Amino acid sequence: MDSNIDVAIVKSYLLNLQDKICNALAQEDGATHFVEDNWQRSTSGGGGRTRVCTNGAILEQGGVNFSHVFGESLPPSATAQRPELSGRHYEALGISLVIHPRNPYIPTSHANVRFFVATKENTAPLWWFGGGFDLTPYYPFEEDAIHWHQVAQKACMPFGDSVYDQYKQWCDKYFYLKHRDETRGVGGLFFDDLNEWGFDHCFSFMKSVGDHYLPAYLPIVQRCKDISYGDRERDFQLYRRGRYVEFNLLYDRGTLFGLQSGGRTESILMSLPPLVKWRYDWKPDPGTPESSLYEKFLRPQDWLAMAKN
């Protein structure tokens, strides 16, 4: 077990990353800013720094949340797959963000990076990193999905030739709505329980993922923000946002962990979009732009191979 585990340096990086992402997104929008809400947990220990923007020129709603919490025992969402964590005190810190643009041609984006330490008297501490980023388009463009995955691959390359493929496949599998038989979007990266490289190398990988979110997302925002749209596109965007809500409330580990551990509800549910629609048994007409999303972009694809064609 590493003797150089340093929670303080992880926290410093995460707070700086939150600043960097909020500043870049607010600057790109130009008509909104992130309102900061500092909070403390009423039970157990710790707190966080939630930042939310609303009603921007580009960003209809976005949240970038930092949290650093403590507890006497991990909730079922954390111990179900790792029973060795039961009965351990834990410390968890991370950044989680979701950006919901107004223009239906700009995808929703999500990213998070996190660090856990679980301790028990007279036993070695267990620690791990997790995180990733994924993209949820409504009117998708192949070039955007390719760019997103090229940046994801770039984030992984210094850590081994197989890392991108492994975490890309994990992302496709994780962000999958079983009851709909579709992925949430075009994926990206997802990793968890990362500790086999040692603390320093694992921390470097987490930083690489966090640092590549803006290079992955901002060019897509810039390319799509001025595409005109009407009621049809807006209506479809709100309908598809319903899938985002379904995934977060049914499957998302971060949401379940936060709620089960007595976290702050407002910060946990900041990921939900401000407006959303559901419609009974709706299906897109064949040959429409809406149908192309279902036919190609809600199934795992080898986006890097497409870039070579």
Image (cartoon, rainbow, N blue to C red):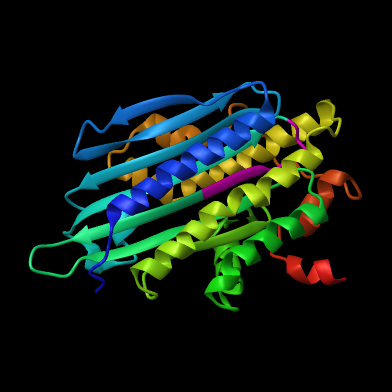
Q: Residue at x 31, y 38 (%)?
A: 263
Report the magenta residues as a range. 103-111
Answer above or below: position of 250 versus 241.
below
Q: Quadrant of residue 106?
A: top right
Toward the viewer: 259 or 220? 220
Indicate the position of residue 188 as horizontal and vertical percent values: 62, 59
Q: Residue furthest right?
A: 287
Quadrant showing the C terminus:
bottom right
Horizontal and vertical percent for residue 268?
41, 37
Which percent across, then down, holds residue 6?
A: 28, 58
Q: Is any part of residue 219 visible from this angle?
A: yes
Q: Is residue 106 magenta?
A: yes
Q: Quadrant of the N terminus?
A: bottom left
Q: On the picture, is 75 further left or further right than 268?
A: left
- Asked if residue 282 lies in the magenta stretch, the reply is no
Between 193 and 261, the one nearer to me in the picture = 193
Q: Residue at x 59, y 50 (%)?
A: 213
> In front here: 216 or 176?
216
